[in-house]
Amino acid sequence: MKKLQGIAVSPGVAIGEALVLDMEGFRIPRRFVARDTVEYELERLEQAIESACAEIARNRDAVTGELGDKYGAIFEAHLQILQGSQLRDELEELIRERHYSPEYAVSRVMRRYAEVFQKVQNRNVGDLADIEKRLLRQLLGRRREELAELTSPVLVLAHNLTPSETANLDRKFVRGFVTEVGGPGSHTAIVAAALEIPAVVGTGPFMTEVSGGDLVIIDGDKGWVILHPDEETIARYRHEAEQLRSMAARLGELRDLPAVTADGVRIELMGNIEFPYEVDHCVERGADGIGLYRTEFLYLGTDREPDEEDHFQAYSRVVRTMAGKPVTIRTFDLGADKVPNLPSPEDERNPALGQRSIRLSLRNVPMFRKQLRAVLRASALGNVRVMFPLVSTLLELRQAKMILADVMEDLEERQIPFRRDVPVGIMVEVPAVVMMIEHFVEEVDFLSIGTNDLIQYTLAVDRSNKDMVWLYNASDPAVLKLIDKTVQAAKRRSLPVNLCGQMSGNPLYTMLLLGLGLRQLSVPPSAIPEIKRLCRSVTMRDCESVARHALTLENARDVTSYLRRELNKQRSEFTA
């Protein structure tokens, strides 16, 4: 048994068989072959080895001719391993005696070799990975077995998953996933929360230690991944999963009750959604509306730009389902490299600081107008708000509002119904906006604090970098002071202010946020019951006391420790 520590990005516990995707996306199943097909499978393995050897020999000769014998020797070493009798004998034994498929046998043997090589100095594990991939390419015909083709429950283990790959996971069969890289604020992490499956990212290398079909446990609450668990660990986690289901049932009883503090202050609990179907989860959990409707899914996993009707159908589905409750639609928050048919920026060394979000919209006005037309058309069906992401200057906001006004005029001329007084807001996620907040509150109808990016830009830390997790922290006093300044400015103007980053869905911060003056929180649908329970169990006086004390602390560690103690007090009273 081996326990890996990663970053918890979506809560829950999942126990099941691993589906391993290597760096190139090959799926290596744990598959057994029929007894009467063993000879055929051995022949297939032999052909794969011969083809791989021929490929390596060609590379050896080409490199030797170009760079000399020293470099050609690298490929000669690969040939010796592949042509050696030890490897072939081990592979043949697994296929003949255990009836493993050649793909699974190759994965199993080469990863065991890699473990041994890692313990021996001057032995390059990368050589073994290269050999394994060559054989798998031959056996699998260079064809990736798509995650969409799953027919049984699995836990996906991968070096990385792109946001589009994560978005396309089949929720019916993918019960959880783990990646070697990634951070808590990455888009992949956000999509994982939307899928409501346990997920852990940033574990570091583990792919050489697991094969498809191995039993794995994903603890999405503590950020643990357990490979090859023993029976005692399996039993403990099954019991824990049952406790979580029992707690969820208790929290479900709060569905139709409002989020009102013990001393009578009403809190609006909204839902963050990524996909249209999530609106059903929000309704099921008694959400007061949609505080953040991310629209990026329309651009992910497709090779064409969505048209106006694609946008309208997605938005109208959510607006109709919410039946008059507010739906805040954020215009697309992507970089140019993620949008089909747009040329990639030539000098985009740091995408987080480059051409993305509102900046990209303002540089591609026809695409921006297309989305705004759909949002306005949907506004005729219910209570719609439009929100611009990553605004950093007043000029950007004014340009966006001018384009919105122009789209309104166009719809009026065509006699297409829409709501003329649709509320317009911005995401507060750049420190420059907070510094100019007194001016921004004069020009918008509402504010929404996006802590995922606000933390990133305040602390100059990549939110997707697992090595920077120690610095990417919502508890940092600088972040808290920016939130406080924003809320106070909105309060002076009687302007609605929401907080919709991942911070809002974490019970650790609920009392702090209420104490800072927030009366609206937008959280992942799965977090609504727990946050509602906490809101109903605290008094505003206690929350304000927590906030005042937290603002006096000097570092994130002290803030987190203090908030955890206060949360544990509330939880102990609830479970008593």
Image (cartoon, rainbow, N blue to C red):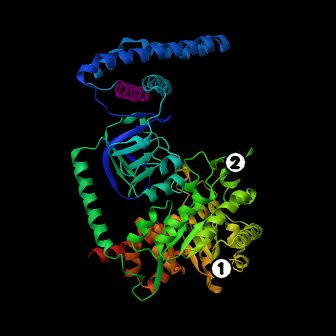
Mark 1 nearby-residue class (10 Å; few <14, some 14–19, many ≥20)? few
- Residue 340 image offset from top left, x and y in percent: 64, 47
Instruction: State whether residue 118 appears in this view.
Output: yes
**Disc with the residue nearer the chain's start (1 vs 2):** 2
- Which residues lie in the magenta part? 102-122
> Would residue 115 be counted in the magenta stretch?
yes
For the residues labelled 1 and 2, say whether their Cβ atoms are less than 8 Å apart: no
Instruction: State whether residue 475 appears in this view.
Output: no
**Image check: 377 left or right of 196?**
right
Which residue corresponds to the image point at 46% horizontal and 12% vertical from the top-left? 80
Residue 342's mark?
2
Mark 2: amino acid: Leu
Dot 1 corresponds to which residue?
A: 421
Mark 2 nearby-residue class (10 Å; few <14, some 14–19, many ≥20)? few
Q: Point out the residue furthest to the bottom here.
A: 263
- Residue 115 image offset from top left, x and y in percent: 39, 30
How would you classify the magenta stretch by its main secondary structure? helix
Secondary structure type for disc 2: loop
Secondary structure type for disc 1: loop
- Residue 533 image offset from top left, x and y in percent: 37, 76
**Image check: 514 left or right of 488?**
left
